[in-house]
Image: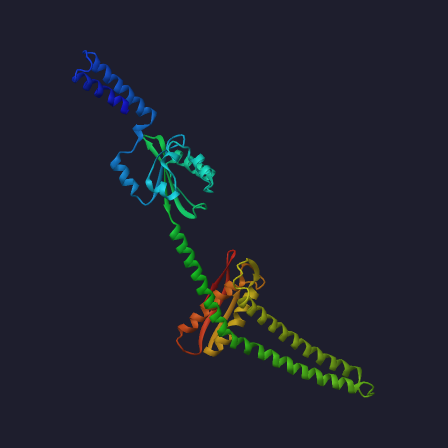
Amino acid sequence: MFIGCFIPLVTNLLGSFGVISISIYVTPITFAFAIFFIAFAIFKFDFLKVTPIALQRIVDRISDSYIVLNEEMFITDFNLTLLNTFSLASSDIRNTNIVDLLNKSNLNIDTDVLVAAINKTKLDDSTITLEEHFEKIDKYFHIEINSIKEKNTYLGSLILLKDITQHTHDMQTIKENQEIIVEQERLASLGQMIGGIAHNLKTPIMSIAGAAEGLSDLTNEYRSSVGDPEVTVEDHHAIANDMDEWITKIRTHLSYMSDIITAVKGQAVNFADNMINGFTVDELVKHVDILMKHELKNALINMNTTVDLDKKTKVDGNINSLVQVINNIISNAIQAYNGKTNQDINFVLAKKRKYVRNFN
């Protein structure tokens, strides 16, 4: 282009100073050469698509990166933000296929997904959004893809890349803080539970101790009856029946203690376990009753539990997390009475279609 501009300029200067003689045909011919070289430069170097300087300065100040692709997905335009973000040079990307550039840059982005999104915008004018982590530069981007059309004719695609790295890190921090708060609440509730658990275990332990004394007395009685002609077969059966009653009571108390230990272990040890396991409605009710009994008793609040479905109904989920949620609701209900006693809290489980619903 510069050669084309200099040909008529130099020719006319030489003619003006008498260095060469100029005929009337020289000037048109030199301008024809100038037009040829300028046209060649425009089509060879794609100058028709070069962004005006003022507009380029504006888009270079935009904080978001952008890329313009032609119909063959070759990059025809971009801004300075893109070059600075990905440490690229203008010569590296202009007239380069976007897929080749991504593969060459080793940015670890799924090019198949990107190409599919670009092709989708060609068809229905939709805006496709993606979120990608560019591992090489350790940055997160919100990507927005739009088609560029004129009179329903597809001309290319516009890809906007918004850096959301700080936002992503902030959300991760918030999530971590929430987990810490949940853990602190769980430990606080466990602290409140300790007194109740001690009381819950004390009662069955005392009952088992009483049963052991009863069995000891029956054992002594049976031992002394051995060889006694006055002790009949019916007497032996009566002693055995009494022993069976004490054994049944011991088993009942041991089962209750096992439920207490299971409930407490679930809240103390396995609460952070997010695995989805099945549990029955009966197990849920037992856990809630065991863990809330002491707090309800201290507050002099009655909890009326109603189960309007089969207690063997299986529920998919994490029982420890659900128990924690229900216990928090019950604790909030106790606090809402603001010290009033002899009040009622209704804990109702009912089935609606295939779901189990909880009402408090």
Viewer-nearest residue: 83 or 302? 83
**What's the colour scheme?**
rainbow
The quarter of the picture where the C terminus appears is bottom left
The quarter of the picture where the N terminus appears is top left
- 77 displayed left or right of 324: left
At a point 75% along the width and 86% down the height, the residue shown is: 221
Where residue 80 appears, as percent x and y from the top left, is 33, 40
- 246 displayed left or right of 222: left
Q: Quadrant of residue 13?
A: top left
Residue farthest to the front?
19
At a point 58% along the width and 77% down the height, the residue shown is: 201
Looking at the picture, does residue 216 appear above or below residue 277? below
- 219 displayed left or right of 26: right
Looking at the picture, does residue 10 appear above or below residue 346? above
Where residue 59 appears, as percent x and y from the top left, is 29, 40
Where residue 21 appears, as percent x and y from the top left, is 19, 12
Where residue 297 appears, as percent x and y from the top left, is 49, 78
Looking at the picture, does residue 201 appear above or below residue 360? below
At a point 26% along the width and 37% down the height, the residue shown is: 55
At a point 57% along the width and 59% down the height, the residue shown is: 278
State how many labels appear.
0
Q: Quadrant of residue 77?
A: top left
Q: Quadrant of residue 252?
A: bottom right
- 19 displayed left or right of 343: left
